[in-house]
Image (tube, rainbow, N blue to C red):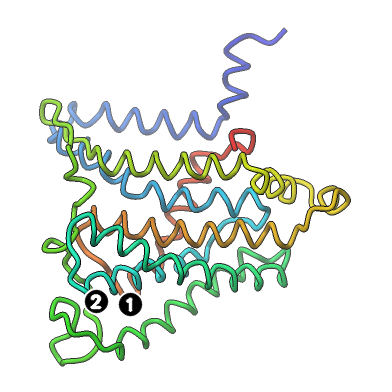
């Protein structure tokens, strides 16, 4: 009979234990080194919450069997397009933020579908091809940002054409979630709105993964041959997972931007997929949970 400790270690996983132990050691060292503990803890909580939806994008694409989403910049660019339209219309507050999400979804659904079609044609090399596709999309959009006509001066370059590299959101919907009834415990600040939004997004993904389509997607990802034998269209399920991942990426960058206070165009999204992938790999993913 295995001991309870052995069962606990096996269920949690060595990787998670090491990562959690390192995090706890860092947390404990902050006051010992006489650093501003409350500020650092607050920033850590804010950083985790603002990246939450971007990390969540990895779940559908992994479950459907298409590997890690190294082409996350496709979804991020769709989110930037939605945010750009919202800012061009000078929408503010929650209306501006949710309008940016609404504007970004059509772009993400179309590009996610096309990206899924591509991934079905390169099975076995998805992650390599995805990295190249993401970088290529960023390069193409660097040209697009230079020539897109906008009237809002906060977006336009001083030379009179093109989008600025960094656009400040303070006057529109910057911090709209972070400042929604934040909790102040001593010197610790918890961004309640952002955390609630991330939890709501997790709940929606959980519901989708436990729906009929989600179950078929999971079956297609775990055993494609058996899924095909049971009448499941594996390619269609892969497209569903990839499209959902791209749409979550569009939403995720808007959540990130409102917390960060800026929208970063051009090469800003270039390496953001790697931090999301690292979070999933280090933290671990449990298929049974979905």
Tell me what residue is drawn at x 65 percent, y 65 percent.
126
**On the picture, is 46 further left or further right than 197?**
left
SS at circle 2:
loop
Q: Earlier in the sequence, mark 1 or mark 2?
A: 2
Residue 96 on image: x %, y %: 23, 62
Tell me what residue is drawn at x 71 percent, y 50 percent.
221
Nearest to the observer: residue 58 or residue 215 = 215
**On the picture, is 93 further left or further right than 44?**
left
- Is 27 rendered above or below residue 278? above
- Is 41 rendered above or below residue 258? above
Q: In which quadrant of the rendered view does residue 23 lie?
A: top left
Residue 173 on image: x %, y %: 19, 59
Quarter containing the C terminus: top right
Residue bearing mark 1: 266
**On the picture, is 239 further left or further right than 174?**
right
Residue 93 on image: x %, y %: 18, 57
Q: Which mark is residue 26?
A: none
Residue 161 on image: x %, y %: 21, 91
Q: In which quadrant of the rendered view does residue 27 lie?
A: top left
Asked if marks 1 and 2 touch (Cβ < 8 Å), the reply is: yes
Distance of mark 1 from mark 2, alpha carbons? 6 Å
**On the picture, is 16 further left or further right than 180?**
right
Q: Which mark is residue 165?
A: 2
Q: In which quadrant of the rendered view does residue 113 lie?
A: bottom right
- Is 97 rendered above or below residue 211? below
Label 1: few (<14), some (14–19) or many (≥20) C-alpha neighbours in 10 Å: many
Label 2: few (<14), some (14–19) or many (≥20) C-alpha neighbours in 10 Å: some
Quarter containing the N terminus: top right
Nearest to the observer: residue 101 or residue 279 = 101
SS at circle 1:
loop
Nearest to the observer: residue 152 or residue 190 = 152
């Amino acid at each position: 009979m295995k001991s309870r400790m052995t069962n606990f270690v096996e269920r949690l996983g060595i990787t998670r234990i090491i990562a959690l132990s390192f995090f706890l050691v860092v947390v404990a060292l902050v006051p010992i080194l006489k650093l501003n503990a409350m500020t650092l803890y607050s920033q850590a909580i804010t950083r985790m919450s603002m990246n939450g939806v971007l990390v969540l994008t990895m779940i559908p694409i992994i479950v459907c069997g298409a590997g890690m989403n190294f082409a996350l910049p496709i979804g991020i660019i769709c989110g930037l397009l939605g945010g750009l339209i919202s800012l061009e219309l000078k929408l503010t507050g929650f209306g501006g933020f949710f309008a940016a999400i609404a504007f970004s979804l059509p772009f993400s659904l179309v590009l996610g579908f096309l990206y899924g079609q591509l991934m079905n044609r390169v099975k076995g090399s998805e992650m390599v091809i995805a990295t190249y596709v993401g970088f290529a999309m960023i390069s193409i959009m660097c040209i697009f940002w230079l020539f897109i006509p906008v009237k809002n001066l906060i977006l336009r370059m001083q030379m009179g054409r093109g989008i600025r590299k960094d656009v400040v959101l303070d006057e529109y919907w910057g911090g709209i979630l972070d400042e929604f009834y934040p909790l102040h415990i001593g010197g610790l600040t918890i961004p309640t709105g952002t955390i609630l939004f991330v939890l709501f997004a997790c709940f929606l993904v959980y519901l989708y993964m436990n729906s009929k389509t989600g179950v078929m997607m999971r079956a297609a990802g775990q055993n494609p041959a058996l899924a095909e034998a049971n009448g499941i269209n594996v390619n269609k399920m892969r497209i569903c997972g990839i499209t959902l991942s791209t749409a979550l990426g569009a939403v995720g960058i808007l959540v990130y931007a409102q917390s960060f206070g800026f929208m970063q165009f051009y090469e800003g999204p270039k390496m953001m997929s790697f931090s999301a992938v690292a979070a999933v790999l280090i933290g671990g993913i449990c298929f049974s949970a979905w």
